[in-house]
Amino acid sequence: MARGFSAAYDENGLDRGCYAAASLPQGAELIRAENPPLPFLRARHQQAVVLHLCRAVTPGRITRHVGGIRNLPPPRVGLLELTPGDTDLEFEAEARTSMLTLSLPQAVFAALDADPDRAFTRGLLPFRDDALRAVLVELAERADGGDSERLFLDHALCFLAAALATPRRRVPVRALDGVRLSRVLGAMEAAASGNTARPPALPDLADLAGLSLAEFARGFRAATGESPHAYLTRRRIEHAQALLLERPALPLAEVAAALGFADQAHFSRRFRQVTGTTPGRFRRGR
């Protein structure tokens, strides 16, 4: 398996007190790092593309080199950067930085029939892309949700890889036809009601529709007005609302478990995100 960016931290003696790594589908990896001032470091990774987001930086000099390109601009809050695989990365910092780092292996791009090298037509300078940043931040918030967030994680990785590897252009979108949509919604409804051991992954739904990942994601949104993960989350919350009213004495932890949420806290976050209130307040208000 290709080495993720966490290997670069480990090899340079930056222990787990400095960063936390989450394993994602298809061999991707997400790191949340709070970097102290760093002496000169040299590292490399074996991922197709690594995407970095600077969340905070203190005053102080930062020196950054990527391969033969010297003295690149330092990280800036809210901006993204890309680093290629199998390339020397050199870094020295008097400043502290807070970073999100997403390692995207070749497998993520291969599933989309996309060329990761096209990501680097953007260059290596820090850049702004509000859509990429928003998805990366939400990915970090949901990365520890396990199987209950699998569909979102699949979709987010698909979106990020496609956006990086595809030039900005309009792509004709065809909505899923009735047969495909009915087949897919049946599988999603079973998951939303807690009748499956684990929620479907995005590749499973695409296979059910007989489409590529990108075609399925676009076609599903065109047919329903929602992304697959947003649709599934909404339906799970609607089932939760019904259960809260039908069984008012059922503990919230058991409602969460019955509908496939990771735990009560995860259930409450998603419930509030969809309805604007908490499960407890919803139950008391009816």
Image (cartoon, grey):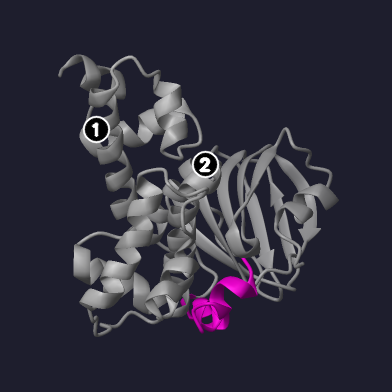
- What's the residue type where badge 1 is placed? Ala
Q: Is residue 97 depicted above or below 151 in this figure?
A: above
Image location of residue 207, percent across then percent down: 46, 75
Q: Residues within 10 Å of mark 2 (few under 14, many from 20)?
A: some
- Is 119 included in the stretch rendered in magenta? yes
Which residue matches tag 2? 145
Q: Residue at the spot x=58%, y=53% of the render?
A: 101
Towards the viewer: 101 or 141? 141
Towards the viewer: 224 or 181? 181
Q: Secondary structure at mark 2?
A: loop
**Residues drawn in magenta:** 104-122
Res. 242 mark:
1
**Does residue 256 appear to the left or right of 14 in the view shown?**
left
- Is 90 included in the stretch rendered in magenta? no
Quadrant of image for the C terminus: top left
Q: Residue at the spot x=30%, y=75% of the render?
A: 180
Q: Which mark is nearer the camera, 2 or 1?
A: 1
